[in-house]
Image: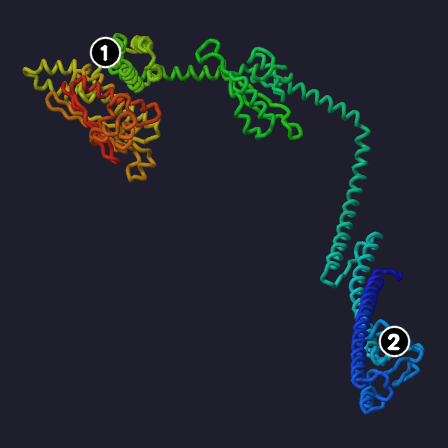
């Protein structure tokens, strides 16, 4: 194995770091200890020297008699003190002559100093080094020296250095062992991975790396094993692909021999298909063309566009081509759609949905419907395909069918209710003549509105939809233009037109389907005649008069069972059959005709306002089907008619709220419950905020009140919230 492998590098690096750290530690420790030790020794040697100097100073009082004084007992004590010191050695000099201590060491050494009375210094003698403290007494000329051999002084430091070296060697050995162990645990898996990589590069994908450690090396080993498996899988797939490509190449060689022939055949097929598609598109009755992103139409369109729009769409602006009523809105729609800020499915319904020319029934009427489809190219809207469908004939046909159905309904109603309808026409002519002949006044518009509302209800009951629709249009016209000074003349013109429309419609039916030679009698009329003639006597003439010129009061309700059924279907409110009670009381029909016709508003309001939807009735514990009841009570010339329903009843709170919008609160608060309910008969009063086919204009109930007042009768209304409403009509005939 090469010397500079990973394990050796780890070992070398660890040892170098250990040696450097240990060496630096030893060097730094030695210097610190050496300086500290030297300072300590100098301090002590100087202190000892000064101590001896002080003792000598006490002994020597006369500088000229030094030798005599040194021979005293006191000096012997000082000498004994110096000789007993086991650490420092001492030398005493008087001027240049040594009087105590070894003379060889300091004989030739200059130890005095003119500038220092006390000092320490290192002295070298015979290759040995000494640390000395020197005190010179200028008074008596005595120099005291204390010294110690440096090697002796530093013996403990040398011992400490040796101990550190031994410790470093032991630590070095432990670290070396641990480094070898860890280097081996790292390098062995790495060497295995390297060897496995070499095997993979040589095409051996079967062996696996087994790493027993639970660290990143194991993850690396698993990754190498996974890589080996994937490479083998890819190579196997590649080999399979190569085999397939070789087979495909053989087939390609076969196909290439007849390529030119195949291209010619496909080209011919495409030409035929294109011709077929073009012919098919041009045969369509629908127009098909494409809008470009700049808002103009491309040159791709079907021939039907020429017949539908009268010209070609090529290079024309889309809004201009379809004759859009709002050119700018159409252009903004195109910009929004091509910007693709919203899905095409959301944008398409915002575009022009149709083109209409003229009105239905006109000779030049035309109605074209538009559908839009996206033309996408690489997820970009490159065009909008417009499908234009001509619905003109369909709408005309549907209108003709509606007209025929309406005519059939008119014929049916007329045949079944000829006398009632004629009376209705007679009353309508009378009311319209009243409008035409009336002068302008403050109440003119209200009266006219009531008349047209009555026509709306009366003719709507017998399915005369043209007359009913014209009456509704007149109502809307009056409510919209009643403040216009010219409205009176316009209303009179419309009243004349309504009269003409009614008479033309009924006269046509009368000429074709009326049999003037036949007088029809209802069963109750025959029964009445039979009972009455059985006791003719003096009353015979009166009986005959009643039979020929009067009808049962019950007959005024004959149109209403069918009306209730019709309104029930329109409102989606199931109703029980309306039962008409029979009465022998007979009356001239013309006297109560206006009142009879006005009752249509009572039934409409009861079903629209009063009767609840079936699901709501179920929640309230009521029967699913609503019910309207009729009761007739007679006494001589007095007639009482009761019409009641089992609906929600009158909402007096809503009535009060509406009144507060018109009148002062003090005036409204004074009204009793009965007064509030009676307000439904006021002109232009309704609790509805919107107008429906059956109620909401606030006119119908006022028409009922006016018809009753013409008969010198009265109305009484009673209602209980949640339980229904009862109308009582009192007539005197």
Q: Nearer the viewer, residue 293 or 154?
A: 154
Q: Nearer the viewer, residue 468 or 624?
A: 468
Display coloring: rainbow
Quadrant of the snapshot with the C terminus: top left
Task: Using residue 445 as the reference point, say whether residue 177 is left or right of it.
Answer: right
Instruction: Check disc 2 and report its element: helix, strand or loop.
Output: loop
Measuring from the top left, give residue 477's x and y in whole percent: 35, 15
Find disc 2 in the rendering and name its residue: 112
Quick one: label 1, few (<14), some, or many (20+) residues within 10 Å? few
Placement of the N terminus among the 4 image quadrants? bottom right
**Quadrant housing residue 238:** top right
Q: Indicate the position of residue 87 as horizontal and vertical percent values.
A: 82, 83
What is the C-alpha distance between the residues marked 2 and 1? 178 Å
Residue 336 visible in the snapshot: yes
Whether residue 642 appears in this view of the structure is: no
What's the residue at 83%, 84% (across, down)?
62
Q: Which residue is mark 1?
A: 518
Q: Residues within 10 Å of mark 2 (few under 14, many from 20)?
A: some
Give the vertical position of 695 relative to 52 (above or below). above
In the rendered image, which quarter is residue 639 located in? top left
Q: Who's the residue at 44% across and 12% down the image?
A: 361
x and y percentages locating residue 247 in the rendered image: 79, 39
Q: Quadrant of residue 577?
A: top left
Front disc: 2 or 1: 2
Q: Residue furthest left?
A: 538
Depth check: give the residue in front, 312 or 719: 719
Across and down, in percent, residue 385 comes to 60, 22
Q: Answer with left or right where residue 575 lies relative to residue 59.
A: left
Can you say whether 300 is above or below 156 in the image?
above
């Amino acid at each position: 194995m090469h010397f500079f492998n990973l394990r050796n590098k780890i070992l070398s690096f660890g040892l170098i770091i250990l040696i450097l750290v240990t060496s630096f530690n030893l060097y730094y420790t030695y210097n610190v200890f050496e300086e500290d030790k030297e300072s300590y020794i100098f301090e002590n040697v100087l202190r000892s020297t000064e101590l001896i100097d002080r003792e000598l100073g006490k002994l020597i009082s006369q500088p000229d008699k030094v030798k005599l004084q040194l021979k005293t007992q006191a000096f012997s004590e000082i000498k004994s003190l110096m000789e007993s010191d086991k650490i420092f050695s001492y030398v005493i000099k008087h001027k240049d002559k040594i009087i105590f201590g070894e003379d060889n060491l300091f004989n030739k050494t200059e130890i005095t100093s003119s500038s220092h009375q006390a000092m320490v210094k290192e002295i070298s003698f015979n290759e040995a080094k000494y640390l000395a403290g020197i005190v010179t007494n200028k008074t008596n000329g005595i120099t005291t020296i204390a010294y110690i051999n440096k090697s002796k002084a530093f013996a403990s430091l040398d011992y400490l250095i040796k101990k550190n070296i031994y410790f470093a060697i032991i630590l070095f050995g432990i670290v070396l062992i641990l480094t070898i162990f860890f280097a081996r645990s790292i390098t062995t898996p790495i060497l295995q991975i390297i060897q496995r990589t070499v095997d993979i590069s040589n095409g051996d994908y079967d062996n696996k790396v087994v790493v027993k450690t639970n660290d990143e090396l194991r993850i690396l080993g698993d990754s190498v094993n996974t890589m080996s498996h994937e490479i083998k899988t890819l190579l196997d797939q590649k080999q399979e692909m190569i085999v397939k490509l070789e087979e495909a190449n053989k087939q390609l060689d076969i196909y290439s021999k007849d390529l030119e022939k195949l291209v010619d055949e496909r080209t011919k097929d495409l030409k035929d298909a294109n011709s077929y598609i073009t012919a098919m598109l041009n045969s369509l009755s629908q127009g098909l063309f494409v809008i470009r992103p700049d808002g103009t139409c491309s040159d791709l369109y079907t021939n039907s566009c020429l017949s539908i729009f009268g010209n070609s769409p090529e290079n024309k602006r889309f809004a201009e081509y379809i004759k859009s009523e709002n050119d700018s809105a159409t252009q903004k729609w195109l910009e929004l759609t091509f910007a693709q800020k919203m899905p095409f499915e959301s944008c398409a319904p915002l575009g022009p949905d149709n083109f209409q020319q003229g009105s239905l029934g006109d000779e030049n009427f035309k109605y074209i419907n538009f559908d839009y489809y996206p033309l996408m190219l690489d997820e970009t809207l490159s065009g909008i395909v417009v499908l234009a469908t001509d619905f003109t004939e369909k709408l005309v046909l549907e209108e003709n069918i509606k007209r025929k159905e309406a005519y059939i309904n008119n014929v049916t109603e007329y045949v079944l209710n000829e006398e009632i309808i004629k009376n209705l026409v007679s009353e309508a002519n009378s009311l319209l003549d009243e409008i035409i002949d009336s002068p302008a006044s403050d109440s003119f518009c209200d009266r006219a509105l009531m008349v047209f509302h009555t026509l709306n209800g009366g003719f709507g009951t017998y399915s005369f939809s043209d007359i009913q629709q014209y009456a509704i249009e007149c109502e809307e016209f009056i409510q919209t233009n009643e403040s216009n000074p010219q409205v009176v003349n316009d209303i009179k013109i419309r009243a004349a037109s309504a009269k003409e429309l009614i008479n033309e419609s009924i006269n046509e039916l009368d000429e074709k389907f009326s049999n003037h030679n036949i007088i029809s009698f209802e069963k109750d009329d025959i029964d009445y005649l039979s009972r009455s003639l059985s006791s003719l006597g003096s009353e015979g003439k009166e009986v005959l008069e009643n039979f020929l010129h009067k009808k049962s009061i019950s007959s005024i309700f004959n149109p209403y069972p069918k009306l209730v059924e019709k309104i029930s279907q329109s409102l989606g409110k199931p109703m029980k059959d309306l039962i008409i009670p029979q009465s022998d009381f007979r009356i001239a029909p013309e006297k109560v005709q206006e009142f009879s016709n006005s009752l249509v508003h009572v039934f409409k309001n009861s079903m629209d306002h009063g009767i609840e939807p079936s699901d709501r009735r179920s929640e309230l514990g009521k029967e699913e089907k609503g019910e309207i009841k009729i009761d007739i009570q007679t006494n001589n010339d007095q007639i009482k008619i009761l019409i009641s329903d089992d609906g929600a009843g009158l909402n007096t709170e809503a009535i009060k709220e509406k009144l507060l919008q018109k009148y002062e609160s003090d005036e409204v608060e004074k009204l009793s419950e009965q007064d509030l309910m009676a307000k439904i008969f006021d002109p232009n009063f309704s609790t509805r905020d919107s107008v429906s086919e059956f109620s909401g204009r606030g006119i119908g109930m006022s028409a009922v009140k006016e018809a009753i007042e013409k008969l010198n009768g009265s109305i009484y209304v009673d209602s209980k919230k949640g339980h229904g409403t009862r109308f009582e009509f009192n007539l005197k005939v």
